[in-house]
Image (cartoon, rainbow, N blue to C red):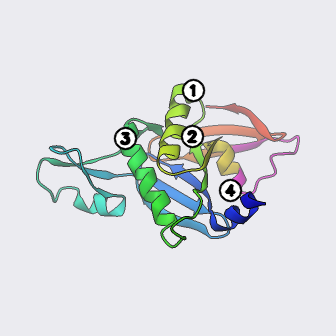
Amino acid sequence: MVTKIFSRFSNNIAIDLGTANSLVYVQNKGIVINEPSVVALNKKTGQILAIGEEAKKMVGRTPAYIVATRPLINGVVSDFDVTEQMLRYFIGKVNRNKFLLAPRPRVIVGIPYGVTEVEKRAVCDAAKNAGARDVFLIEEPMAAAIGARLDGQEAGGNCIIDIGGGITEVAVISLGGRVTAK
């Protein structure tokens, strides 16, 4: 009963952490964030100065000790702490208008096909540390098939090509699962 009540105040969020851009989808609202996967850092202090669109605007307009970094390479977390801060920013932006004591959101994050268990764990830990209540992972080609509303339950195959800023994946989906992917 308490879970049902809390779930009314919580968001279900899907995050596409991309090498070039990140998107955040909120259930019943659609895509609410589409920003560059860029973080501006002060190299002297390690302080994060800006994330997303604001960080991208700073590129080339700051002193040498302020750098713009992309925390994902080829769709995989390359800087855990910066990725966590970027996720915290996105989750916070989505929950900005929620009650102060609103429950943490459930989050599903797209990951490239073939990532290692360590890389999966890094994404889960970063999302939980950023404020997610529960974290679920989905392979990006499967997420693309769901987003395209393809009927992956039938015996015939569907070819999915997911072209991203850092990685392109091709997968065949059939009978509710991935048959093959590259």
Across and down, in percent, residue 21 comes to: 44, 54
Residue 89 lies, with reference to residue 120, above or below; the image says below
What secondary structure characterizes most of the magenta part? loop
Residue lying furthest right = 155
Q: Is residue 144 visible?
A: yes
Q: Residue 81 bears which disc, if any? A: 3
* Magenta residue check for 112: no
> Mark 4, residues whose alpha carbon is within 10 Å: few (<14), some, or many (≥20)?
few
Question: Which label sits in the foreground, 2 or 4?
Answer: 2
Q: Which residue is mark 1?
A: 117
Distance CA(mark 1)–CA(mark 4): 25 Å
Question: Which label sits in the foreground, 4 or 3?
Answer: 3
Across and down, in percent, residue 26 comes to: 61, 63
> Mark 1, residues whose alpha carbon is within 10 Å: few (<14), some, or many (≥20)?
few
Q: Is residue 116 visible?
A: no
Distance CA(mark 2)–CA(mark 3): 18 Å
Question: Which label sits in the foreground, 3 or 1?
Answer: 3
Query: Residue placed at 79% from the left, 60% from the top?
Result: 1
Q: Where, by quadrant of the figure, is residue 77 drawn?
A: top left
Q: Secondary structure at mark 4?
A: helix
Across and down, in percent, residue 162 comes to: 59, 46
For the record, the magenta segment spans 146-159
